[in-house]
Image (spheres, rainbow, N blue to C red):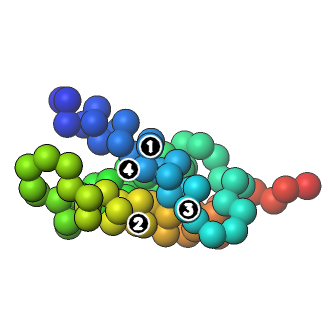
């Protein structure tokens, strides 16, 4: 149970970091979608590159990069127009 809470908290933080590092104006997607992108980045990043004891920097940066890619895809697919 604690692992899933960690994934949700980490996904929120990673999603916001991914939104921050994504190029261009990516503020046109809702916060819940940003969190979903972050959770996807955490699950895939740590699934592929994690597995060491302690904090794994490679998995962290992979998760942020994947979340940024997911945020860009989400913004392109479901972005709201700013009027």
Q: Are marks 1 and 4 in contact (CB under 8 Å)?
A: no
Residue behind mark 4: 39
- Circle 4 — which element? helix
Q: Earlier in the sequence, mark 2 or mark 4?
A: 4
Cβ atoms under marks 2 and 1 closer than 8 Å: no
Q: Residues within 10 Å of mark 3 (few under 14, many from 20)?
A: some
Residue 21: assigned label: 3
Residue drawn 43% across the image and 50% down it:
14
Which residue is nearer to you in this view: 46 or 54?
A: 54
Q: Nearer the viewer, mark 4 or mark 3?
A: 3
| 1 vs 4, front mark | 1
Examine the image and state in which quarter residue 28 appears: bottom right
Q: For the residues carrying marks 3 and 2, which lies nearer the camera in this image?
A: 3
Asked whether the beta carbons under mark 2 and mark 4 sit within 8 Å of each other, the answer is no
Q: Which residue is mark 1?
A: 13
Label 1: state its secondary structure.
helix
Which of the marked residues, 3 or 2, is nearer the chain's N terminus?
Answer: 3
Residue under label 2: 66
Q: What is the distance, in whole Å, between disc 4 and disc 3 at their CAs?
A: 16 Å
What is the quadrant of the C terminus in the image?
bottom right
Q: Classify residue 11 as left or right of residue 57.
A: right
Drawn side of residue 72 relative to residue 50, left or right: right
Separation (CA) of disc 1 from disc 3: 12 Å
Q: CA distance from mark 2 to mark 1?
A: 13 Å
The N terminus sits in image quarter: top left
């Amino acid at each position: 149970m604690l692992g899933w809470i960690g994934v949700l908290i980490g996904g929120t933080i990673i999603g916001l970091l991914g939104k921050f590092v994504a190029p261009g104006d990516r503020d046109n997607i809702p916060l819940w979608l940003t969190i979903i992108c972050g959770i996807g980045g955490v699950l895939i990043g740590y699934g592929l590159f994690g597995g060491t004891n302690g904090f794994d920097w490679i998995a962290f940066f992979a998760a942020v990069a994947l979340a940024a890619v997911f945020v860009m895809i989400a913004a392109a697919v479901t972005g709201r127009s700013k009027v």
